[in-house]
């Protein structure tokens, strides 16, 4: 059976690192199995869904290179959900309820005060046709609940192992709101059936949902898909990440210049028993992915690790891969390959390409201490005579200076580095010198 997974965001906001976890896991799982990846937009909540978020979701996934094989939107499938709801009504598994939110809140409060779990009491099941007619005449509209079998519902979770939910302590889920709007719970099951989804990988906040959805699958006469629930992201101090997620949108990371592969490398291993490693391609990510390696413990998110991976990746990038970055930084195409080889180990981020190109072009303020003025002047004169510079120039000149001046080590090299680059550190001077354009 071909593996089919899906990522199913609701377009009610921008995607953030918390959403990336299921997106990437589903994508990697599908690719690893040679299967298919569906992008499904859960947009039945017309009030909160926005087209601009749908566009942003696609842009984010494009940026990350997480392509999809099929694109679906729930808002275009209402007929299917209607038919499924009718089927469930026919079986007596979907019933009308008329409580207002306030009434439900009161019930919950009373139950809690009496030390009972706040589970919906199914009062609506006892309504007669007359009761319902009276409610409708009062202007109330029904919302529709799925009648759960009050039994233990379990599955073998791809991450959590054997998992069991006692549906006797779960409220019958509302599948249709009083305004007729379908809730995700039913739509998702219909879609997972129709699109042949074989594995649902999502956050552990959906565990209870899964038990109710398994019952809906079974009521609709279909075998449930496989399920795997990953742990949620937490801050370095262990607290929930939800408050900071606004600043951790994929869009803001992209705008901050984060390397997509660094982000993916991090997220593909975060919360697993395997080490976090910089992966230079999607093929490498797929190769190193193992759903079974994810653990149940909350995953501690640390933004700094992404940048560190980005730096590592940058150092190993071949010229062809950074050519556009070099062009954007204004690097002369003739020397660009050589320039990249010389600087790449010495930069932490792509921004520094332009910094080094400026230095190479001679746009810098030499840093010369008073005590070094004479020494630097002698050295520069010698360098001038040694033109044109090649890879051996530096060695020859510094050997001469050493015997002439008696300087050695840092005293010999550092004043020259500072005079020629304006900095105290950077690439190997022997390799850099032939590139300098002063
Ligand atoms: N739209 C749901 C969410 O974003 C999808 C959950 C699921 O994967 O089934 O939470």
Image: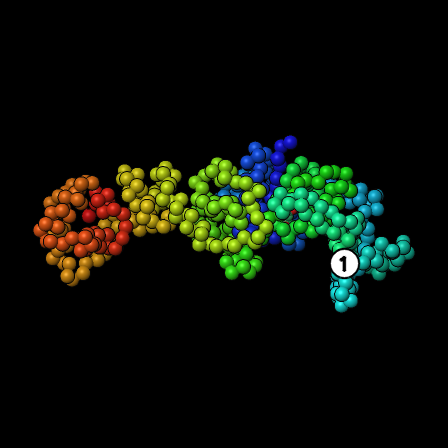
- Picture coordinates of residue 136, whole percent (x, y): 84, 57
Q: Residue at x 11, y 45 (%)?
A: 385
**Left or right: 302 as drawn, with respect to 47:** left
**Residue 163 visible in this rendered orientation of the protein:** yes
Q: Residue 394: which quarter of the image?
A: top left
Of residue 141 and residue 146, the one placed in the foreground of this image is 146
Residue neighbourhood size for the residue with mark 1, other residues' Cα within 10 Å, grouped as few (<14), some (14–19), many (≥20): some
Q: Residue 298: which quarter of the image?
A: bottom right
335 vs 122: above or below: above
**Which residue is situated farthest in the top direction here?**
1
Tell me the quadrant of the picture where the N terminus can be found: top right
**Which residue is situated farthest in the bottom direction here?**
113
- Picture coordinates of residue 324, whole percent (x, y): 37, 41
Q: Residue at x 34, y 43 (%)?
A: 326
Classify mark 1: helix, strand or loop.
Answer: loop
- Picture coordinates of residue 230, whole percent (x, y): 59, 48
**Mark 1 Cβ inside 8 Å of ligand 1:** no
- Disc tally is 1
Figure colour scheme:
rainbow
**Left or right: 241 as drawn, with respect to 380:** right
- Picture coordinates of residue 220, whole percent (x, y): 76, 40
**Residue 69 visible in this rendered orientation of the protein:** no
Q: Which residue is mark 1?
A: 119
**Left or right: 134 as drawn, with respect to 150:** right
Of residue 37 and residue 1, the one placed in the foreground of this image is 1
Q: Residue at x 57, y 42 (%)?
A: 291
Q: Residue at x 11, y 47 (%)?
A: 400
Of residue 126 and residue 144, the one placed in the foreground of this image is 126
């Amino acid at each position: 059976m071909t593996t089919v997974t899906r990522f199913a965001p609701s377009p009610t906001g921008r995607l953030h690192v918390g959403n990336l976890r299921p997106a990437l896991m589903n994508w990697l799982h599908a690719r690893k199995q040679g299967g298919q990846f569906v992008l499904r937009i859960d947009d039945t909540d017309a009030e909160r869904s926005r087209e601009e978020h749908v566009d942003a979701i696609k842009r984010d996934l494009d940026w990350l290179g997480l392509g999809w094989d099929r694109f679906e939107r729930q808002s275009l499938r209402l007929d299917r959900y209607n038919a499924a709801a009718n089927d469930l009504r026919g079986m007596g598994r979907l019933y009308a309820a008329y409580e207002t939110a306030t009434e439900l809140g009161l019930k919950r409060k009373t139950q809690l005060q009496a030390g009972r779990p706040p589970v919906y009491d199914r009062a609506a099941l006892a309504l007669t046709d007359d009761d319902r007619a009276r409610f409708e005449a009062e202007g109330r509209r029904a919302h529709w609940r799925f009648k759960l079998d009050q039994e233990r519902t379990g599955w073998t979770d791809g991450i959590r192992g054997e998992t069991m939910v006692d549906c006797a302590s779960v409220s019958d889920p509302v599948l249709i709101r009083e305004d007729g709007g379908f809730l995700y719970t039913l739509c998702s099951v219909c879609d997972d059936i129709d699109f042949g989804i074989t594995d649902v990988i999502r956050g552990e906040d959906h565990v209870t949902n899964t038990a109710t959805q398994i019952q809906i699958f079974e009521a609709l006469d279909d075998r449930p898909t496989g399920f795997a629930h990953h742990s949620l992201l937490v801050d370095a101090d262990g607290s929930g990440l939800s408050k900071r997620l606004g600043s951790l949108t994929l869009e803001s990371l992209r705008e901050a210049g984060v390397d997509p592969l660094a982000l993916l490398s991090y997220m593909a291993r975060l919360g697993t028993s395997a080490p976090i490693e910089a992966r230079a391609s999607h093929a490498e990510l797929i190769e190193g992915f193992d759903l079974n390696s994810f653990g149940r413990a909350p995953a501690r998110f640390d933004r700094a690790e992404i940048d560190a991976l980005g730096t590592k990746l940058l150092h190993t990038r071949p010229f062809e891969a950074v050519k556009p970055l070099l062009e954007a930084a204004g690097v002369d195409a003739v020397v660009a390959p050589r320039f990249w080889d010389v600087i790449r180990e010495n930069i932490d981020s792509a921004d520094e390409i332009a910094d080094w190109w400026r230095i190479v072009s001679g746009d810098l303020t030499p840093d010369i201490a008073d005590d070094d003025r004479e020494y630097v002047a002698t050295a520069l004169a010698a360098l001038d005579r040694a033109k044109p510079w090649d890879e051996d120039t530096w060695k020859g000149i510094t050997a001469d200076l050493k015997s002439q001046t008696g300087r050695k080590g840092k005293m010999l090299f550092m004043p020259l580095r500072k005079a020629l680059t304006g900095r105290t550190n950077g690439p190997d001077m022997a390799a850099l010198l032939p590139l300098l354009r002063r």
